[in-house]
Amino acid sequence: MDEFWSPVRLSLQVALWSTVFAGLLGLLAGRLLARRTFPGKSMVETLLLLPMVLPPTVVGFGLLMLLGKQGIGSLLPEGQTILFTWYAAVIASTVVSFPLMYQAAKSGFELIDPDLEAVAKTLGANGWQVFWHVTLPLAWPALLSGVLLSFARGLGEFGATLMVAGNIPGRTQTLPLGIYNAVESGSTSLAWRWVICLFLLSFLFLWIIQRAGKWKDSHKV
């Protein structure tokens, strides 16, 4: 039984943490770039969205170089590494999920009427109060969509994770990697159970996103 649940637990753990990191970074980047214009903005946005269109192997290779002994790995104590741990899987999922969260956050902030924030400021609210009580509530349907899409993307990440975390049962084997391994070893029954589990989770998240989108359309500012 643990053979089935171990990848499920690890996938949920990786997806949860990657969504936290991608959510915070995407929220910050979306807020900073939603209404600002500056030379090179299109270049910056292109770089931020690049992981969404690059082949997973390219993203994985870049992370492999960054986290390995040629990069951050050289700063770690001897014998310690980020590669081939579940932390590496979180980093890979964060990188590929970030563009989805960034796009959702940026779109949500762009749709807010600046006059509403200006009115709050004239009433004595500071920047943080305006963001917390005005901006965030108005943008939350888009932010929720970004969070759920990021979670679903992190849950299904395969290529980059395989390169930086490997496919180690009980340590770094997520659901997509487990399915691949089960098919390779001829365990079709186990692969089917994992596929159904992943399908149901993904269906649930997409259904919630659709519901959030309908709520957003019926509560436009």
Image (cartoon, grey):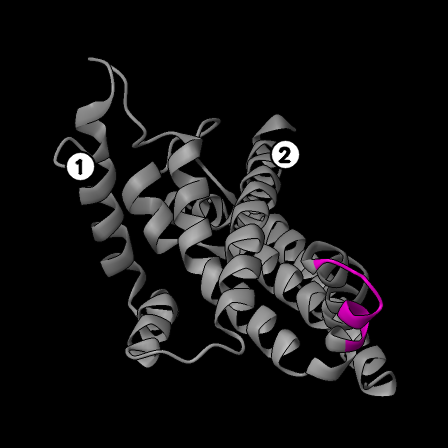
Q: Is residue 199 above or below residue 22?
A: below
Is residue 3 at least partly visible in the picture? Answer: yes
Position of residue 156 measured from the top left corner of the image (x, y, whole percent): 51, 56
- Going 57% across and 44% down the picture, which residue do you hit? 190
Counting labels gives: 2
- Res 148 quadrant in image: bottom right
Q: Secondary structure at mark 1?
A: loop
Q: Residue pushed farthest left?
A: 70
Residue occupied by mark 1? 71
* Residue beneath disc 2: 5
| Residue depicted at 58% across the width and 31% down the height | 6
**Which element type, helix, strand or loop, lies under badge 2?**
helix
Quarter of the image with the C terminus in it? bottom right
Left/right of residue 72 with respect to residue 117 in the rendered view:
left
Task: Pick the quarter of the image with the N terminus.
Answer: top right
Q: Amino acid at mark 1?
A: Gly
Q: How far across and down, in percent of the image, does residue 193 sit?
A: 63, 49
Q: Is residue 150 magenta?
A: no
Residue 167 at x, y percent in the picture: 37, 37
**Of residues 9 and 187, the one drawn nearer to the viewer in this rendering:** 9
Q: Going 64% across and 59% down the picture, which residue do you hit?
A: 147
Looking at the image, residue 192 sits to the left or right of residue 140; the answer is left
Say if mark 2 contacts mark 1, CB within 8 Å.
Answer: no
Gap in angstroms between the C-alphas marked 2 and 1: 34 Å
Nearer to us: label 2 or label 1: 1
> Which residue occupies the foreground of this view, 124 or 193?
124
Sequence order check: which comes first, mark 2 or mark 1? 2
User: Magenta segment range?
Assistant: 119-126
